[in-house]
Image: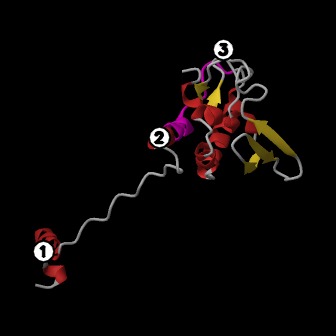
Amino acid sequence: MTGWQMGWRDVAASVMAEGAQPAPAPAVENFGLPDDLASELRRLETMPPPRKLECAANWRGVVIDAMTLARDRWAAKAMALGWTAGDLFGIGPRDDWDFQGLAVWLDGRRIVLLDDKRAIAADASGESRSSFDRGGMRHGTLPTIEPVMLWDFGR
């Protein structure tokens, strides 16, 4: 029998006899982060803005910055240097005046340098740079403020 004369059962039997294996499913991108954290970030990307926001339009920018941190591998690099998920993706339980993680602070800027204590970010033009200090102003300076993760904020 030629290929065009074979039925689907014959084709399947032929493939099985040759030991062909189906192609593996594509791996889900984890951005170099722990799987559970990467999963929460992917979920954040599809979630509606939190109910308690005064300006929901600003939330989209925070989500974009969080995903950029992950996709550009800065989050994985930071965690390898001792940063926590809260340092990167945390927010105060009431708003960002209580606590800002790096993703909340970025406001559209892009990371250009990062070490165990600080991130340096540049604006779109690259001419203006700003510094985010772990444990600095509005980031962990009030020991009574326990941040929540962006994907849990206002839910």
Residue 127 screen position, x and y as percent: 89, 52
- Numbered disc 2: secondary structure: helix
Q: Which residue is mark 2?
A: 39
Mark carried by residue 144: 3
Q: Residues within 10 Å of mark 2 (few under 14, many from 20)?
A: some
CA distance separating discs 2 and 3? 28 Å
- Toward which corner of the image does residue 102 lie, by quadrant? top right
Q: In the image, 30: left or right of 111?
A: left
Mark with earlier residue (1, 3): 1
Q: In the image, 125: left or right of 145?
A: right
Mark with earlier residue (2, 3): 2
Q: Dots 2 and 3: beta carbons under 8 Å? A: no
- Numbered disc 3: secondary structure: loop
CA distance separating discs 1 and 3? 66 Å
Residue extent of the magenta highlight = 39-53
Residue 54 screen position, x and y as percent: 71, 20
Tell us which disc is closer to us: 1 or 3: 3
> Residue drawn at (62%, 23%), measured in percent from left and top?
147
Give the quarter of the figure containing the C terminus.
Answer: top right
Query: What type is the residue that disc 1 sits on?
Result: Ala
